[in-house]
Amino acid sequence: MRTQTSRKKPPEDEFSPFGKAHTIATFQGRSELYIENFKKLQYFSCTEICVQTGSYRMRIQGKQLKICFFTPDEMKITGQMEAVSFY
């Protein structure tokens, strides 16, 4: 006999109104940063990168900043990161 299982619905605060999970920023030391589930890239240069997330903007400042890869869901930033701020 086969039983039917139902999928649990995640808590409401885990997802934005657009269906994506909250933005996740993962640092690998001071030279690598992975960003997942962001909305869009606002601005970038070799000294500053600004990313729009669900409810705030994330500003990465440093030297020799590069975007190694960029997809609709994630990106990898490398370089000498000196400051990260949210506004």
Image (cartoon, rainbow, N blue to C red):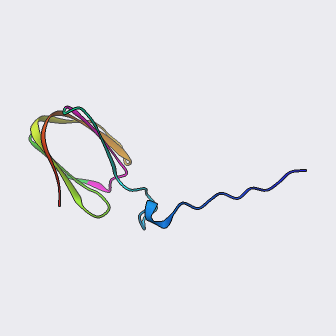
- Image coords of residue 31 (percent x, y): 20, 31
Relative side of 66 to 11, left or right:
left
Quadrant of the image occupied by residue 66: top left
* Location of residue 16 with respect to 76 vertically, above or below: below
Give the overall secondary structure of the magenta segment.
Answer: strand
- Image coords of residue 85 (percent x, y): 16, 52
Residue 20 seen in render: yes
In this rendered view, identify the residue nearer to me: 84 or 76: 84
Magenta span: 31-40
- Image coords of residue 35 (percent x, y): 31, 45
Q: What quarter of the picture does the C terminus occupy?
A: bottom left
User: Residue 36 lies in magenta, yes or no?
Assistant: yes
In this rendered view, identify the residue nearer to me: 6 or 79: 6
User: Residue 69 lies in magenta, yes or no?
Assistant: no
- Image coords of residue 37 (percent x, y): 37, 51
Q: Please report the residue visible at 34 percent of the width from the left and 53 percent of the height from the top.
A: 23
Quadrant of the image occupied by residue 62: top left
In this rendered view, identify the residue nearer to me: 58 or 39: 58
